[in-house]
Image (cartoon, helix red, strand yellow):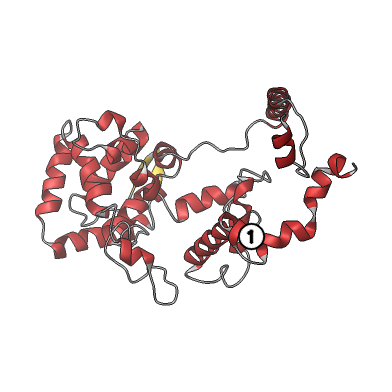
Amino acid sequence: MSRKTDEYFKDVPMKSYDLIKEGLIVFGVVSALIIVLAIIFSSPDYPTVTAKQIATYEPISYLRTFTDILLGKSEISNYGPPYDNDVKNAQSLFGIAPAKILGTTIPINAVNDFVIDPLSHLAVIDKNVQTSLDQFKNASPQQRQVWIDNYSKALDNATVVNGKVQIVNGDYGPLPVIMNGLLLLGKSGLLEGALQKNESPYDFYNLNYTKPLLLFQGKVYHSVAKSLNMLGEDWGIANETGNYPGAWWLWPYTFFYQIPPMSTSPNGDLEVGLIMIGLFLVLLFLPVIPILNKIPKWVKVYRIIWRDWYKK
């Protein structure tokens, strides 16, 4: 270096290193570690629970899901933003509810999107389903309510015989055919595809799984999660099958979810989200925040990192 350059870098810690060599060493060590751990522990991820599995092994719970949708009692029926305009349960902080401001960005009509539309695809090849759908849609709201109430009560005492759900005779209108059609869609493994189907010419590239993920909530998934010890009491939202830790980089979220008031607040999701945004902004602007930007100088960690230079 020239004399001017030497003067410019005077008292600046510098040391030579081979970036490519160090990068290759790190890559090799990490790759070997990943391969060894994968061989020893395999993957803790449990395969996604599908509608086909629920329809096959829990057909009554499967039908109960759709009955609750028709009754307007499912978790998605009046979820609120971003799926519908029901904002009474929107989380807020100091009177401000971001969900209200953003509004309904993914509009969902539970009855149409989860019952009527999927069955309309099956109705093309099954005229009984088409007839039943027409009867249901043309009936008065009062008549539909009677059928749904009767069917819902009958499910409480339903039995499964040879994979078929048996209920006592009653005034159910077209619901038995409609529900059997939904059960058939589930068992065939075609329900998720029917839920995602739209009229776009680019439907082949549809990667939006919002509706299939929203359909089976509550008791069905809760029972599966409980059997796998994945309810979240121990690991929060970052949990894997058994005692495996989940995504470790989410530990700040899981930490705040376990302490009051976030652990008991109905606005916990919003509170944790705002806390994490605040912490991120602190880290982002740390070099210009008074007092905090002096911490590295006070702690003097840099003297440990550059210890060979400071020995001179």
Q: Spot the residue most to the bottom.
A: 94
- Residue 178 coordinates in the image, percent (x, y): 23, 45
Question: Which residue sits at x=33%, y=46%?
Answer: 211
Q: Residue, x 22% and y 41% (percent of image)?
A: 119
Residue reaching furthest to the right: 311
Image quadrant containing the C terminus: top right
**On the picture, is 253 further left or further right than 299?**
left
**Badge 1 amino acid:** Phe
Which residue lies under the disc numbered 1? 255
Q: Is residue 296 left or right of residue 175?
A: right
Furthest toward the front, the residue is 3
Is residue 221 depicted above or below 27 in this figure? Answer: below
Decide which of 23, 229 is in the foreground and name it. 23
Residue 37, placed above or below residue 216:
above
> Can you give x and y, in whole percent of width and height, for residue 35 in the image?
69, 25
Q: Where is residue 189, by image quadrant? A: top left
Q: Residue at x 72, y 61 (%)?
A: 295
> Which residue is at the front of the view, 163 or 245?
245
Q: Is residue 52 left or right of residue 22?
A: left
Residue 78 in view (yes/no)? no
As drawn, 252 above or below 178 = below
Element under label 1?
helix
Res. 5 in view: yes
The image quadrant where one finds the N terminus is top right
Q: How many marks?
A: 1
